Amino acid sequence: RHIPVICIDGPTASGKGTVAAAVAQKLGYRFLDSGAMYRITAHAAIRAGLAIDAAHEEQIAALARELPVHFHGGRIWLDQDDVSDAIRTEEAGMNASRVSALPQVRTALIDLQHSFQRLPGLVADGRDMGTVIFPQAPLKVFLTASAACRAERRYKQLISKGISANIDTLRADLEARDARDQSRAVAPLKPAEDALVLDNSDLSIDEAVDRVIAWWQARQ
Ligand code: C5P
């Protein structure tokens, strides 16, 4: 394909969403938040009264194939429900991780993710963008940060939104989510063989964005 894709994968709260969105903005590219697809699927399953487990895999995959999702006004809608805030909670993240371990659900979401690859280019944020969804992408970045650092950032984010949080619980939750994402059979979280690893524990957002842009320019 001739439409360029930059993949930014990595563990929970590594800053990939923020960095990927900023890179997309600077380059004028589209942005795919693939985690949102899993969050929305989990939300749709719960709304339909389905427990998120292997026994309901087929039913949840059927929902995922025909997600009535719309993006407008900077908000995310599932039918008439504005789910923008509901899908961003820690619990929604944990439910997304559980739904994303179901292989049929992953398959069901492939076409939707591919549909974001349009001109002039795409920055894709997730866990398996470089390994599974866009394996021919010319630039794959694996963005990491220490667990302590990721827990602290998430803590500050929540506090700034007026949501109370406990930093030890946050760290335990994100480590549990990473462990599940790394150990699942299908599309586990791991760097692609040709990924460039960027540890942003000690970088500002701007520094991480500049590094990715510099790598991209070096490939042109
Ligand atoms: O990135 P975010 O925290 O929104 O992702 C929520 C969950 O969705 C992750 O913990 C992971 O289990 C799953 N996910 C995935 N593959 C992706 C993106 C997210 O399995 N490409």
Image (cartoon, grey):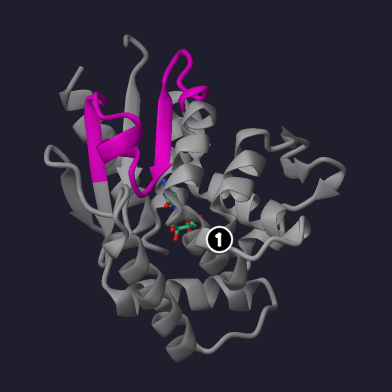
The answer to whether residue 23 of the structure is visible from this angle is no
List the residue tagged with mark 1.
55
The residue depicted at 52 percent of the width and 68 percent of the height is: 94
Q: Quadrant of ligand 1?
A: bottom left
The quadrant of the rendering that contains the C terminus is top left
Q: What amino acid does circle 1 point to?
A: Ala
State which region is magenta.
114-141
The quadrant of the rendering that contains the N terminus is top left
Residue 40 shown left or right of residue 17 in the figure: right
Residue 2 shown left or right of residue 117 in the figure: left
Crowding at dot 1, Cα within 10 Å, few <14 / some 14-19 / many 20+, comes out as few
Ligand 1 within 8 Å, label 1 CB: no
The answer to whether residue 11 of the structure is visible from this angle is yes
Q: Between 48 and 69, which is closer to the camera in this rendering?
A: 48
Q: Between 187 and 149, which is closer to the camera in this rendering?
A: 187
Residue 62 shown left or right of residue 181 in the figure: right
Q: Residue 69 location, x and y as percent?
A: 71, 37
Q: Between 71 and 205, which is closer to the camera in this rendering?
A: 71
